[in-house]
Amino acid sequence: MPEITLSIDGVSVTVSEGALVIDAARSAGIDIPHYCYHPALGNPGVCRLCMVEVEGLPKLQVSCRLKAKEGMVVRTNSSAARRAQSSSLEFHLVNHPLDCPVCDQAGECLLQDTYQRCGLYSSTVREDKRHKPKRVKIGERIVFDSERCILCTRCVRFLDEVTKTRELGVFGRGDREEVELCPGRRVDNPYSGNIVDICPVGALTDADFRFQVRVWYLAGTASVCPGCARGCSIFVHSNVQRPWHAGGRRVVRLKPRFNPEVNGYWICDEGRYGCKSIDSPSRLKAPSLLKDGKVGAISWEDATKLVSAELAELCRAKGPQGLAVILSGTLSNEDLFAAKRLFIERLKAGHVLLRPGPDQLGEEDGLLRRKEKVPNLRGAQALGFGTAIRESSWEKILAGLTSGEIWGLYVVDRDPLAVWGAEAGEALLGLPFTLHQAANANRFTRAARWVLPSTSYAEEDATFTNFQGRTQRARKAVAPLGEARPDWRIFGGLLAALGAEFPYGSARSVFEALAGERSDLVGLDFELAPDGEPR
Amino acid sequence: MIAEPDGIAKVRIVKAPEMGFLERIYLVEVLKGLLVTSRHFFINLWRHMKKALGRETEPGAVTIQYPEDPAVVARRSRTHHRLLRREDGAPRCAACMLCETICPAKCIRIVAEESPDVMIEKRAKSFEIDLGRCVFCGFCVEACPVDAIRMDTGRVEMAAFWRTDMARDITQLLGERPRQ
């Protein structure tokens, strides 16, 4: 597309033809205040806030509907433009309650931010504010406050254009105009959380996050959602400054991070609310050993030594054919690299299972969600799981357990009892070796002799390869809970105890070693991995 | 040090005056100091004697017999905190966390919950101040948008034997009364 050059606030900007002035300004680092415009949701031009002065045009223009032209001279900051912006803002504030202290959006509110920049600090409005319904639950997780709504229609357009579920509409006229649910509908679609993100004010709030933590206590870490094979870019919002908030949860919410290649501006609700597992009471905090019917805590050193000794002894006495390893696509590339070293190259386990079974499959749609609810299936395939390393199956392993062919079960993250049913628990009872290595306890944890706690995805640096083959970086947002260790470190410890080499001290060094085995990772920098080009 | 608008501080270096011989031998200076204290002593003695004889005089310096006599606290002093109530008796605090945020000693702990009243929106489920950490700066009072917290009880006595006893919860804070 041909390029054109225009001048915005004296800065010369080159954009492709057809670009909007508001986008051109943003590319030059000039932020024009706006509410209704959203790059993914079009530009209805209803908020009238992004007014700019254009040389040669008699009236001010809304920059979100104005296409950039060659040689255009735009002023976003002239006194006329500023006056127009602040008068528009005054209109927005006519009925907007000034309850910032109790409003959950305070701190990340576009209305607040704009007011700081171009507010008319002495309002000329003398009339009383109009009251509208407050705290309306318009969906399972969405709370709507009509008073705070400035009718930018972003939420309505999101539901019309992105999810196409059309639950909300704008009804009424004048100061009675309101966003309302369409008759008989509720905002319960699988992407509903996004309307909270795009709401520029506190009209739409998240029932799950409401009043939990003030947003200014939060720290954001760029990471990747582990909810499904798509691997959406996210921000992990964690609160460590004031631990008494949100009931002690450190990771309080996930927010989408713009990534045009993977998820655009959105994430699904499944991923968004999946973060609760990180600080759930089911988290495993210390290694333990079931002995004579009692669960006893044990140190990592002893656990590593004893587990590796048991594995070596049983492999020698009964043969490695009897060892079944159930891995998971939730493991990062680094974890899988170490797992391959341990189970395939060192122990030569007879049964290895990684493919998502019924326990890790879910719904898929054309928008974001993928059927496989694990983030790293492609990464596992790239390492040879399912191809060079033959996959066993749930049926084969269960058959092996009942016939006594299998003497040991090493399970990472998953719950075999959820697949086999609780009856299979009996087949596990007499097993010489059962180990559960996971972040959260499940039914299998109680049946397993050994329990090793691993970190959750927000507690370690890692890379995941999504279904497109993009390797993306998840970053450590909070410290590991209790004595939990990254999976690769646990495998590495066992390898070292078995006398094998595993000389890696950080996820980065594991990644670099891994790049030697996986051609798709060559030249990828661990630090820059999230922005790496798709291969 | 005078702060300049562009953020660069202008520094004026002041040299400590040199000490002379008499100052360096200390003895003279010690005697001078003694002279000052004895002057105060004798003036006070004179004033108290005059008062005892029933004569009009300027008041002499007195030692307050604390704790038998109450401590004198200026009206504007920042003293023990209290939480205020609405007209219907409910705590005024809207759990906005502004005081908790501004508190330099991080001694305020608030947990918010949804208020049954839609117009009030939210309220404090718990509100704790750890007086052992409080520096009595009064920022919480300044920050409060609903005038829910004040430091006007006139109470300065809050010693305790254990750190845990220095914490005040919402019922204790609501129970405090302003100074009469």
Image (cartoon, coloured by chain):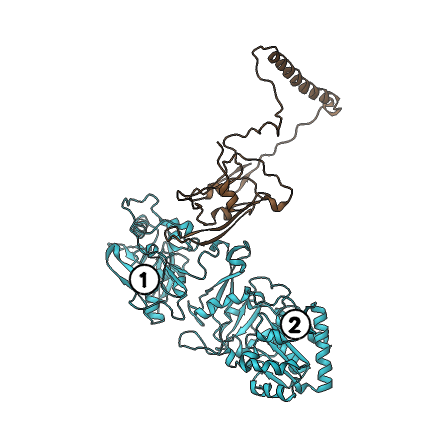
Provide residue B14's location: percent of width, then percent of height. 61, 32
Q: Viewer-proximal residue, A27 or B73? A: B73
> Disc 1 marks which residue?
A153
> To which quarter of the image does residue A301 belong?
bottom right
Q: Viewer-proximal residue, A380 or B145? A: B145
Provide residue A210's location: percent of width, then percent of height. 44, 58
Give the amino acid at mark 1. Answer: Thr
Task: Tell me if residue B30 comes above or below residue A182 in the rendering.
Answer: above
Image mark for residue A216:
none
> Disc 2 marks which residue?
A490
Q: Viewer-proximal residue, A373 or A152? A: A373
Q: Does residue A388 appear anywhere in the picture?
A: no
Provide residue A326's location: percent of width, then percent of height. 59, 80
Provide residue A476's location: percent of width, then percent of height. 57, 64
- Spatial CA distance of label 1 from label 2 is 50 Å
Task: Tell me if residue B54 comes above or below residue A292 in the rendering.
Answer: above
Which chain, by letter, is brown? B
* Circle 1 crowding by C-alpha within 10 Å: few under 14, some 14–19, many from 20: many
Give the amino acid at mark 2. Answer: Ile
Which chain, by letter, is cyan? A
Residue shown at the point (72%, 22%) measured from the top left: B30
Mark 1 lies on a secondary structure that is: loop
